[in-house]
Amino acid sequence: MESVRDAVDDVREEIAAAVRRLDVAAARATYWAQNEFLVLERALPAALVERFVADVDRTRPLLHRNYIPRHKKGGSVSYHTLVEQAPAILALYRAPAFLEFLAAVTGRGLTHCPDRDPHACALYFYTEPGDHIGFHYDTSYYKGNRYTVLLGLVERSSSRLVCQLYKDDPARPLQELRLTTDPGMLVLFNGDKLWHSITPLGADEERISLTMEFVTDPSMTPVKRLFSDLKDAFAYFGLRSVFHSRRARRR
Ligand SMILES: [Fe+2]
């Protein structure tokens, strides 16, 4: 049987091969033409996505559900859980070739979020009717810019990722896209620039996506850290995941 370490090595090689197949110059041109927003259909091959979906199935019993009236409803699995239970997903997040690709497209010196950040990479489960998230920016609480990579993993739904481009640019007309995030589809954007939402899930539907965060400067002021922690605890992963996991790691 394949060991976890062999599997991680395989994933890393498959990611490097997938990234080599992408047209970096074209991706970069499109990203900048669209105000730091890019969609790549089938960016990662089905065999690789299957490995990530196996991680999804392993972590599904551990998801934390939350509900904020009129803003969001759904389940999430934090980075802290993925570190322990999702080796293929972690291999993607940490793959040097993947980071190099993102840095080349954005033209920024990107790095991973600190290990303490439960959003560094996380799974979002839309599994019950009405699961959704309202319009928002992926605001950076870091001193540097924050970039989001969204990867579609399971798509059996009528939900759409609604993106409003140029909302922060009065010189350009607003453009709205309604995307089906099919398995293997990758969306990359600057979190402070893209106004986006997920429309409500219908009955007997399911949509699961992975998001990964990268930053230009991972430092954060204490006040913003507290605000960020409280938001994560109440809106996403629960007090236990955000604060207890941190204490456990300190010990
Ligand atoms: Fe978001």
Image: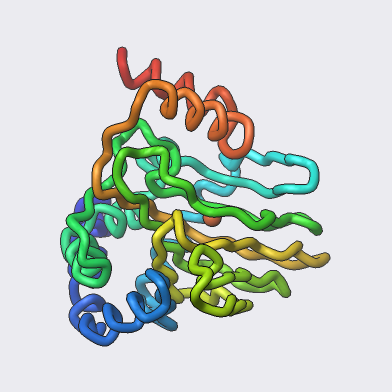
Q: Quadrant of residue 233?
A: top right
Query: Would residue 49 be visible to someone looking at this image?
Result: no
Q: Specify whether 186 is left or right of 240.
A: left
Residue 201: percent from the left, percent from the top? Answer: 75, 64
Q: Looking at the rendering, in which quadrant would you find the C terminus? A: top left
Q: Nearer the viewer, residue 143 or 242?
A: 143
Q: Is residue 18 above or below residue 15?
A: below
Point 44% across, 43% down: residue: 119
Q: Looking at the rendering, in which quadrant would you find the N terminus? A: bottom left
Q: Nearer the viewer, residue 109 or 79?
A: 109
Residue 23: percent from the left, percent from the top? Answer: 24, 86
Query: Would residue 110 be visible to someone looking at this image?
Result: yes
Q: Specify whether 173 is left or right of 67.
A: left
Q: Nearer the viewer, residue 40 or 143?
A: 143
Q: Quadrant of residue 196?
A: bottom right
Residue 217: percent from the left, percent from the top? Answer: 24, 43
Q: Nearer the viewer, residue 116 or 57?
A: 116
Q: Specify whether 236 is left or right of 148.
A: right
Q: Is residue 22 above or below residue 226?
A: below
Residue 245: percent from the left, percent from the top? Answer: 43, 24
Query: Colour scheme used in the picture?
Result: rainbow
Point 22% across, 49% down: residue: 111
Point 44% across, 56% down: residue: 191
Point 55% across, 26% down: residue: 230
In this view, the residue farthest toward the front is 171
Which corner quadrant of the figure contains ligand 1?
bottom right
